[in-house]
Amino acid sequence: MSPEALSELIFNIANTLVSEGKAGTLTADLIPPQAKFAVMRPKDRAHGDWASNAAMQLAKKAGMKPRDFAELFAAELTNADGIKSVEVAGPGFINITLDSASAAAVVDAVLEAGDTYGKNDHLGGETLNLEFVSANPTGPIHIGGTRWAAVGDSMARVLEANGAKVVREYYFNDHGEQINRFAKSLVAAAHGEETPIDGYKGAYIDEIAKRVIDEANADGVDVLSLPRVDGGADQDGNPLGEGDSEQREEFRKRAVPMMFDEIQRSMKNFRVNFDVWFHENSLYSDGEVDQAIADLRARGDIYEKDGATWFESTKHGDDKDRVIIKSDGNYAYFAADIAYYRNKRHRETNPADVAIYMLGADHHGYIGRMMAMCEAFGDKPGENMQILIGQLVNVMKDGKAVRMSKRAGNVVTIDDLTDAIGVDASRYSLARTDYNSPVDIDLNLLSSHSNENPVYYVQYAHARSCNVDRNAAAAGITYEGADVSLLDTTADGEVLAALAQWPALLREAGDLRAPHRVAHYLEDLAATYHKWYNVERVVPMELTDPEARGKQADAIRIAKAPEPARAAARLKLNDAVKTVIAEGLDLLGVTAPDKM
């Protein structure tokens, strides 16, 4: 019997007590939904397999003492199938012990469901637009963006496991001053000049500059001979922006796609695949910025002052109003944000019911204006728009911070990290910590084959379970004759309980946007499995050390050799663990090796 089944049983008992007039002043409308009845694993196993505080939740509404109300629940639970015993403890806790067959039923549930065990559709019917990474196309993905890649893709997988339709989206900031600075840096590098004060540094700038020159030459364009004078027009007669030049524009139009390609390659190699690659520049070229401003103007949220156009965001909780068209006629950056949100909510293909933004730590000040804009469009902040702020990543080696990248200067890039520890360790280590907290990445630890390395520890549990399968097959042990009620040892019970908690954990990870909970669960399951492996056997242990032979060794072998029905049941338990670990690792975008 799973925790969910117990929650449902307790919910039904509460309604039965009301209908039979045994629940005092409690009425059916005061009983919370089934999911609100928490069933927990007691810290002290002497208190049973599971515990509930349902009586304490409802006692006040019933006008009864919690312990007295708990006794009513206990009487009903004692008569339920699969429950061995029930006791009331403390102020009103209900402690439940299952019979072995009921506790072990989770094994067959896992094996029957396979990699869909625990998955559900409670977020079905919603389209969630999940935007993450969205680094400027002015350089390689740095370590902060790498964290968002790991967390964002894992979050998308977890949300999909809960039934949501998820649109993974990358927003290319290919419009504005940062692109101009990028182009200026490339021009300077091409001429062997010092990097502009506000420019980008790193060997990659020299690489891209050379690639632009080579590509232009192949097209018959001598890019270095183009005018470097500011202003003017491009080859099609379109006016160039302030501070621009024909040469800089040539570098821009060729280099930005090169960075797009590099970013896309890095994401693909990191096992992150986006459904939408959205270009900021399209918001301007397609007139969506003007349309979004017109919509807000029609809603009464736009006004003119000091020659500029303002969004009256204070009407919707922001701390000050925001300029969206500056007095010189240029758009403020926030204008694109307004248009982009409107686009997400109203696009023809997969319009977002919920737009989730994953932003870096330096964007915390954006939340107020973004939520104000959401409300101005008639939506609900926190529901239709959700903003997640990630914290910093520190990369450590030999106890010291790693800062230098050979290619990108004073940063660590996605390729630096994966070259050092691989994709599995990179993704797992970045996704296992709550994005609200800073994280230290210890390169020495994550490249080691030790139990202190969390990704190795979990992957080794999967590899160990695969080895058990191979040994069982060699010994002729199959599922035939399995009796899961024989899974009645303490170690068996710990593994069974861990497996039973996976569905609730997966649901919680989706609702809380918390993929790190999956990693923590996997580490707990792996620890429980490793302990089980060390004390229980599927295949009889063979001692090969001549020093260990004799009566004592024979006694050890006999003690470690389970009867066929128990061995078959343990094989099923082993495979249930293997199934859930593989499923959990896949949700984190990490492989589940069968050998290590």
Image (spheres, rainbow, N blue to C red):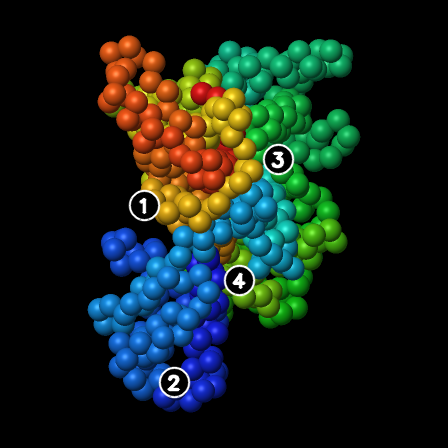
| Kind of element beneath mark 2 | loop
| Residue highlighted by disc 3 | 273
Q: Image height check: is 82 above or below 330?
A: below
Camera-nearest residue between 415 and 594:
594
Q: Image height check: is 513 above or below 55?
A: above
Q: Are marks 2 and 1 in contact (CB under 8 Å)?
A: no
Identify the mark nearer the N-term, 1 or 4. Answer: 4
Visible in this render: residue 506?
A: no
Residue 134, quarter of picture: top right
| Residue highlighted by disc 4 | 383
Identify the mark nearer the N-term, 1 or 3. Answer: 3
Where is residue 406 drawn, in percent x and y?
43, 15
Disc 1 crowd rating (10 Å Cα; few below 14, some 14-19, many 20+) is few
Residue 540, quarter of picture: top left
Which tag is nearer the camera, tag 2 or tag 1?
1
Identify the mark nearer the N-term, 2 or 3. Answer: 2
Q: Image height check: is 103 above or below 475?
A: below
| Residue highlighted by disc 2 | 23
Which tag is nearer the camera, tag 4 or tag 3?
3
Label 4 to label 3: alpha-carbon separation: 25 Å
Identify the mark nearer the N-term, 4 or 3. Answer: 3
Which tag is nearer the camera, tag 1 or tag 4?
1
Q: Residue at x 28, y 80 (%)?
A: 68
Camera-nearest residue between 332 and 234:
332
Where is residue 434 drawn, in percent x and y?
38, 45
Disc 2 crowd rating (10 Å Cα; few below 14, some 14-19, many 20+) is many
Question: From the image, which quarter does the C terminus lie in?
Answer: top left
Label 2 to label 3: alpha-carbon separation: 54 Å
| Residue highlighted by disc 1 | 490
Label 2 to label 4: alpha-carbon separation: 36 Å
Residue 26, quarter of picture: bottom left
